[in-house]
Amino acid sequence: MMIASCCRRALLGVSFGAFATLSALPAHADQITFVSQGGAYQKAQTIAILDPSAKKLGITINQDSIPDAWPAIKSQVASGKPTWDVVDVPTGYCLRGGEQGLLEKLDFSKLPNGAAMPEAYRSPYSVAYEFYSSVLAYSQKKFSAEAAPNSWADFWDVKKFPGRRALRNHPIATLEAALMADGVAPDKLYPLDVDRAFKKLEEIKPNITVWWTSGAQSAQLLNDGEVDMVMAWNGRVSALTKEGAKVAYTYNQGILQSTSLCILKDAPNLATAVRFLNEAVDPVHQANLPLHIDYGPANPKAFDTGVIKPERVAQLPSAPENAAKQALMSYAWWSSPAGEAAEKRWVGFMQK
Amino acid sequence: MSSPVQDLSVLHQRREQRLMLALAMPALLVILLLVVLPVGWLAWQSVYQNGFTLENYRRIWSEDIYWRSFVLTFEISLLVTLLALLLGYPIAYAASIAPKRWGIIILALVVLPFWTSVLVRAYAWLALLQRTGVINQLLRQLGVIDEPLALVHNSFGTIVATLHILLPFMVLPLYATMQQIPRDLMQAGASLGAGPMLTFWRIFLPLSLPGVLAGSTLVFVLALGFYITPELLGGGRTIMISMLVSRNVELYDQWGAASAVGVVLLVAVGLIFFAVSRFIPLDRVLGQK
């Protein structure tokens, strides 16, 4: 199952939804319950997207947060009386939920903002909400800007770039990186050649010091000098940079990943939920998100609004120039039987 | 023989037994509600999913990832138990023979880490053991090593941290047993001409065995289920069985696939206890009579 990003954000804000609910408007107004992952990420959304959307639509948005929404989605829908309307989850969950009949099929004629987004950014059950990227990050103490690793082939080249390395202890994005290291072009990855990817991973395995499991760990390893280069989420590395750490990363061959919005089957406020979903990917709200956190807007039109300054645009994973250098993750492939089989192979690979 | 006085005492004894049972009922109920029922429910899930199925067990049987993790888990647990015994025995011994006040101080030091969460202690070990950590830096400054040692992100780091967390579970039962060993016995041994080594070896050590067994059992069983230390300090390579439980919840999307792993572990531990009980009476391990 996809847990691609359930843990990448601080889980600090679990109780955040509780106090957000307190500020609710009168109960008779149209309302929805929106669920995201809490922490700084949910606060940023509240300022950039949720509050402005509520105001514009004249609705109340009750918030809840949960690090891993999937089990709750399953049990809520199974009960026949879900309490949540819209959830923000790793895109893979939306695809799987759609397949399993847990989500409402979206009518894109009612979602003009979503319909205008690139087809790869949506599914019959979901619309992409924000982007992050699995990037190659390195220590500037070890590598100067000119002599820094700049591709997965460089990451795999232990002679030209000696140093200690870390990868994520998870096949998602790691198999993609291995294939790019083996010469597959970022836009020709899918369907993944799983055997080839694992073979390439065997090659680098003796040189991997740590296989990290949480986003915090990946940042700590790089920050403490425990490793010299690492595959990490862009937001984790830029947070280190802000604290003054001598680290950097490249978007070249990054793996662009997303969370998406989807609506629970038989959601209590279906019509309002659809209105909100359309509003949430409005270019202006979307453009406001990266002013508060290091994630990129999912709606490319956000970059035409002029809200994001050019120097900020250059830092964002989904900015057109950066996106062009990266591979767009195919959640559809990872949700397919081949993708699930690849996930099951991982532990066996780690044990050898 | 059946004098009225004796009848009365039997009656009294029975009444006391009933009272004890009644007093124990709340605790038994709590155990039933919080342990037996959930474990039973999980075990049921592992064989029943829209009908009876052994698929979850067939998978464990046929895929060797489970076998490898079981072997690793038992190896690490056994090693941790032995090390805890080697380290814990002298501590408990010192605490039991030291003057009362010193004994209390030693025990306080043993129990003190309990006040810190397991997670915090795991991170503390990371700060100590990692490449740029305290120990490696010290050794480098002293000129003992040129290159940092790989002390963490492997089984070594996992074992050190697990051992640290479980050590009190060895020391406390040992201390409790040792305290009950009458000192006169050693004095009697000495008065018959035995030296300190011999009295320890022939008198003290055998009498402390129930504590050894109790502590070892506790440490071993707790180590089998460890999750945080291998996850944080194992570098991704030390895959203990608890990690496969959590992986199966994620991967197979249902409790059964995970609980089957737990059931197999439970049964394996049960079998080990059964085997051990053939040689050592279990009531000495658990009840310390």
Image: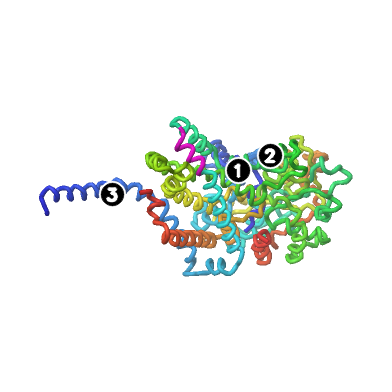
Q: What is the span of residues highlighted in magenta in the rendered image?
A: B89-98
Specify few, some or many for label 3: CA neighbours under 10 Å numbering under 14, 14-19, or 20 or more.
few
State yes or no: residue B30 in magenta: no
* Sequence-earlier tag: 2 or 1: 1
Percent position (x, y) of residue B213?
45, 51
Percent position (x, y) of residue B238?
63, 54
Amino acid carrying label 2: it is Ile
Chain containing mark 1: B
Q: Nearer the viewer, mark 2 or mark 3?
A: 2
Question: Circle 1 is placed at which residue position?
Answer: B122
Q: Nearer the viewer, residue A199 or A25?
A: A199
Question: Circle 3 is placed at which residue position?
Answer: B21
Location of residue B62 with respect to A213 vertically, above or below: below
State yes or no: residue B93 in magenta: yes
- Looking at the rendered image, the quarter that the N terminus of chain B falls into is bottom left
Question: Circle 2 is placed at which residue position?
Answer: B135
Do pointers 2 and 3 mark residues of a single chain? yes
* Sequence-earlier tag: 1 or 3: 3
Label 1, label 3: how far apart the Cα atoms are:
42 Å
- How many numbered circles are shown? 3
Chain containing mark 3: B
Q: Nearer the viewer, mark 2 or mark 1?
A: 2
Amino acid carrying label 3: it is Leu
